[in-house]
Every structure is written in structure tokens, then in C-alpha cells.
Amino acid sequence: MTSLLHLAEHRVQVVALAFMAVVYLLRVVWLFRFPRARDRQPPTGRPRTNAAKGAWYSMAAIGMPWSMETTRTRPGLYAQFVAFHLAVAANIVLSFVIPYAPGLLQSLALTRLLQVVIGAGFVVGVIRMVRRVRDPVVRRISTPDDIFSLGLLTVWFLAGVAAAPNSVAGGELHLVVYFLLTAFFLIYVPFSKISHYLYYPFTRYWLGRTLGYRGVFPIEHVGGSTTDRLGTPSPRAIAADLAQGPS
Amino acid sequence: MSRVEPSHKVAKVLERLPQHLTRQIVGSLVACVHCGLCTDACHYVLTNPDDPTYAPAYKADRIRRIFKRHHDWAGRVLPWWVGAAAIRTDEELEELKDIAFGKCTNCRRCTINCPMGVDFGTVNRMVRGLLVSVGVMPEGVAVVSKDQWEIGNQMGVLKEDYLETLEWLSDELEEEFGDPAARIPVDKPDCNIVYTINPREVKYDPRTISDAARIFYAAGESWTMPSEGWDMTNFGLFSGDDALGGVVAHRVYEQVRALRGRKLVMSECGHGYRSTRCEGPNWAGEDIEFDMESSVITMLRYLREGRIKVDPSKNASSYTFHDSCNNARSCGLYEEPRELLQAVAGDVREMYPNRAENYCCTGGGGAMSMSEYAPRRLKSAKVKADQLTATGAKFVVTSCHNCVDGLTDLIKHYKLDMKVTELVNLVAQALVMPKRPA
């Protein structure tokens, strides 16, 4: 191992991690400096739910694609979400395994599993990039940060696939690139949209607590969704209908 | 080139923005990942699929960019990179007005469909409040707000007209039942129920007041209506003006206390229920010591307790129930109206989606008072029209006066063979009046 790779694997990672942790902490402190909105009124809605149930339901929504119409009716997008985020987790794990528990990667099965999971994330990253560019709404709302963050992660996944075997037989450039990308990722995320996972527990908790207190969460689905039962026409069909005027 | 200074109005908006930033709102402003999943949750988007500017995430970003530019680190240092931007001109405020009032009914359907928990409905209401604070609002919002500030109700009904309406309704009830006790009590102290209404009932639909009176009479309820503070609607919810919201809510609470009423009951009105029952105490900064409930729950309780008897065969047509966004999506009031409807009508058909996932009637968020946006509203109503048509029902029942108007408008526009009614009408129609001792 060259000194450059050692530096990239260890000291750079530690510094980047520490930096990320400090900035995240400051982010949370910043968020909590804003006053909390208060619900003075007694609870409304069904008596069998409450703020705590609403909060748990809301935070667990990530694992319940049936809980929201948006994920219930678009299983493909939900599957992409799962694959992408599993890949992020696997790639982060890999960045610790290589320097601190390289022996684990002697298992070919584990190495292949990591490569498959992270590789799936790469494929989803490409699909998401295409969607971000082609979908008129998503394109319109995308910022340079959105594009860069997605591109960064997608490239990082590719580097992860290459780095997973932890082999220097063909040189160590791929490992150096992987660790430098990881370090950059750690430093960049607190300033980018990738930091959404920091906010997720708070936003979901607050929304869930309020809507649980008001008897809305957990949402009851009776009889299925629009698409299931009503057969609401697609947006294009609605637009075509409208073009013909009131029927 | 010299830098353009913000206009006076923009400066005021920027100055007042921090006062509105709660932890929850800031969370909604920073957490969006621009995934676009909210898009199909919005009835405006569904009916304008080629116009990305209707997407909730886009609309939110027009607001978010200002927050980021002035309050977020990344937005201050690299604004173009994260989509932050300063606003400087009154034209930009007009653009925000068009979004906040004209492209969103604050129905919160995108809120419950956002994977991140971004509450765009609440953010949009905040922006409305900021714009209203500098006089940037649709004319209708200004007029209605003025009426509620000055006259005490949002339709400018004078006290004399209100009391006169109650008087002639009382005369009719007395004649109908042949009982001097069958009148509408006004300012009667120490009653179980202080009943408050939507001024639309006085102005356009007094039968809902007399129907409620019939039900109270049949139940043998001790009730009264206040001569002041009787409007439980609250335009502060729509205009985003918390000060107005607090004053209007306080007026109602004050009357209940003055009359020593044990419970405040609100007639069927989605935004009135949400405003008075849920948001009012927060706006007014008051802890409320008496109970508050929707008349839907009151009527259902009478039925469950056997205080009123109904004959569902008197409502022999086919019915579907439309959930008001404020009732269902913001207050969890959706099972009780269904139970009540099932009890008083024979043929009840569910529309899909329903309950907290129901689509807005498109008259929400004060949209009925903003006539400049009526074409957009009616275009977006295609989604609701399709929902209604699919049920094949002859009546759409709702628990909201705003929805009554919104639905009536879209039924006319899309030429649906359907009428709108409220639960109070159906319950009164189905009443089996008890025999009273002579």
C-alpha cells in the first residue's frame, strides 16, 4: 500500500467524517433555534390514534410503500428508492470495511453481494439522471446541486463496485479514487440536498405528531386508490378531455 | 452596474419572514429533495400536465429560494448552486401571489404524499400571510378579510339581518311544530350548546339553520345561538393572517364564555371546523376550557343515544360523500359523517380515493372568493368531476359550505346530473318527530 492510499483510506476519511459530524451538529442546532409550533387544542379525530402513533406511522412510512398514494401507485420508483439507498448504505459500510476489517472481503460472496447492491445503485443513479433530465417537472425543479449530487453518488457507486474486492493487483488507483470520492462526499453532503436524511426524522416526526394528534395519521385506505377503483384517466387523457370542453 | 435595492414591499416581506419561521416550516423549506413525487398528488397538475409550474415542488421552490437566499448557509454562499435567489421587485411578489393564491388551494394532498414530510400547504399559507401583510392579495381576499375584521363575519352580514333571519326562521318553526318552544334561542345563557354557523347560511342557505334547529328541537337539546361572534368561519386560515385568525376565533370563544355555554358546536364547515376547533386556540394564544365539536358529531351522538329517530327511506335517492380537505386531511373527521350518512340515507356509494386521500372540491383555500382564478379552478375540477361521475350517485353530500359552492360550480360547469346537499339537510329530512305532550 502506498502512502497516498493509506492517507486516503485513513486520515482523510477521519478528517472528512469529523468535519461532516461537526457540520451536521451545527445544522441540527440551527434547525432547533427556530421556535416550535404548538398545538393548544384538544386532539381531534379518531380516538384510537394519537400524536405518538402518528409520529411512528409517519417515520415508518419509508418502509411502507402502501401508506402513500405516490409510492403505492408507482412501485417502480419505490423500488428505485430502495435500491439507491441500500447502495448508499453498502458503499458507506465498504468505506469502513476496507481500512478497518479488510479480512471480511476475503469472502467472495460478501464482495459480490456488495458489488451487486452498489452496482444496482449505480444503475438506478443513471436511471434517475435520465428522469431528472427528461421529466419536464423534475427538470424544471432541479438545481445544479441536484444534478451534481446525483452524479457524484452515481460515480461513487461505480468506484465502490471497483473497490469492493480491495485488490491492488492491477494497481491502486481505483481505491485511491474511491476513498477520495468518499471523503469529498462526506465533506460535500452537509451543504447539499444529500443532507435530506438528516432532516427526514425531524420533518416526518413533526408532521406525524401533528396529524396523529388530529386523527389523520395513520391514514385509512378504504377501497383502494384512485387508480385501483376509479380508474382516473392519466394526466394526458384529462388534458385531452379538457381540450374538448365540458362534456 | 448598481445593485437593485428591494422594493419597500419586498423589504417588509423579508423583514417579516423570520417571524413566521417555526421549526416545522423550516423543516419543510430545507428537506425537499426535488424527487417530484408530489406532482401527481395535485389536482392542478393532473389537469395541467404540460405545465411544470403547477407542480407542488416547483411552487414550493419559488418560496424556498427566498428562504435559502436569506437564511440558509449554502444559499447565502452559492445561491445559484442550490436554487436560492433574492427577490427585489413588486412584480416578483405578484408572481408569488399568483402561485400562493391562484395555483394552490392549500388542500395538503401533496403534504400527505411527500416522502420527506414536506408540508407545502402550511408553507403556502405562510406565504399568503406575508403577501397579505403588504397588501398583495386577490381583491376577493381583501374584501372578505375586511368584512371579517370590521363587521365580524366574512360575508358582511349585519347583526340586524342575522337576527331578523333567525326571527323568521323561528316563526316558521313555531308554526310547523305548533309549539312556541320550537324557536331558535338567541343569547340564552347556561345552555349545553352554543351553536355557531357559516354566514353563508344566513345569506344563501337559511334552510341549514332551520334544519339544525329541527334536530336540536327533536333531540330536546338546550341550545342557543349568540347574537355576536356567531361566525365560526375564519378567513385567517385562507389569507394566512394569523392576527385575523386569532381575533375571529377569540370572538367566538368569548361568546361561549359570556353565555356560560358548556359546548361550542360548529355547523358543517370544513375550514370553520379546522379554524375554530384546531387552529384558533393557537392563533388566539388561548387555552380553551370548554368542549368544541362539529355538528356532525353532535347529530351522530343524538342518533347513538336515541335522542332522535330517523327513517332513511325518506332519503331515497343515491348519495356519495365528499370529504372536505380541512375536515378529513387536517382534522381526521371522516368516519363520523359516513356513519351518519349511512344511518339517514339508503343508497350510499363511496367515491375513490376518499377520506384523507380525497381530492379537493377545488373551492378550498378561499378559492371561491378569488374570481380571477375561476377558469383555473374549474379546469382543475375535472378530477373531482370524474370522481363524482364514477359513483353514479344523484347527490353528493358534504360537510362543508365551501365545498357546497365548489361542487355546485363544477357540477354546473361539467353538466353533471347531480345535486349537492349537506348532512344536516338529510338528517332533518329523515327525522321522525317525537310526539310531544299537548
Image: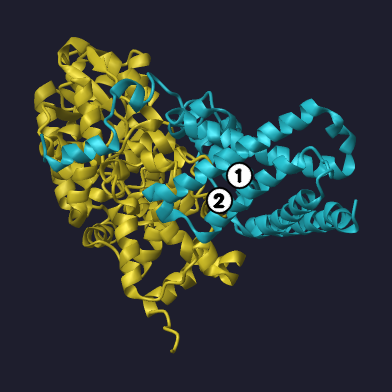
Q: Residue A91, located in which quarter of the rendered image?
A: top right
Q: As displayed, is residue B129 above or below residue B316?
A: below
Q: Nearer the viewer, residue B275 or B436?
A: B275
Which chain can be seen in cyan?
A: A
**Left or right: where B14 falls relative to B143:** right
Which residue type does callout 2 highlight? Ala
Which residue type does callout 1 highlight? Tyr
The image position of residue B152, as x and y in percent, is: 28, 55
**Color style of the picture:** by chain
Provide the residue designation for mark 2: B31
The image position of residue B166, as x and y in percent, is: 17, 40
Chain bearing tag 1 is A
**Which numbered tag is attached to residue A200?**
1
- In the rendered image, which quarter contains the N terminus of chain B? bottom left
Tag 2–tag 1 contact (CB < 8 Å): yes
Q: Nearer the viewer, residue B92 or A56?
A: B92
Q: As displayed, is residue B194 above or below residue B54?
A: above
Q: Nearer the viewer, residue B197 or A86?
A: A86
The image position of residue B368, as x and y in percent, is: 22, 48
Q: Residue at x 49, y 26 (%)?
A: A66
Chain bearing tag 2 is B
The image position of residue B241, as x and y in percent, is: 38, 59
Q: Nearer the viewer, residue A195 or A181?
A: A181
Q: Secondary structure at mark 2?
A: loop
Instruction: Give the colour of chain B.
Output: yellow
| Mark 1: few/some/many CA within 10 Å (<14, 14-19, 20+) | many
Distance (Cα) linking label 2 and label 1: 7 Å
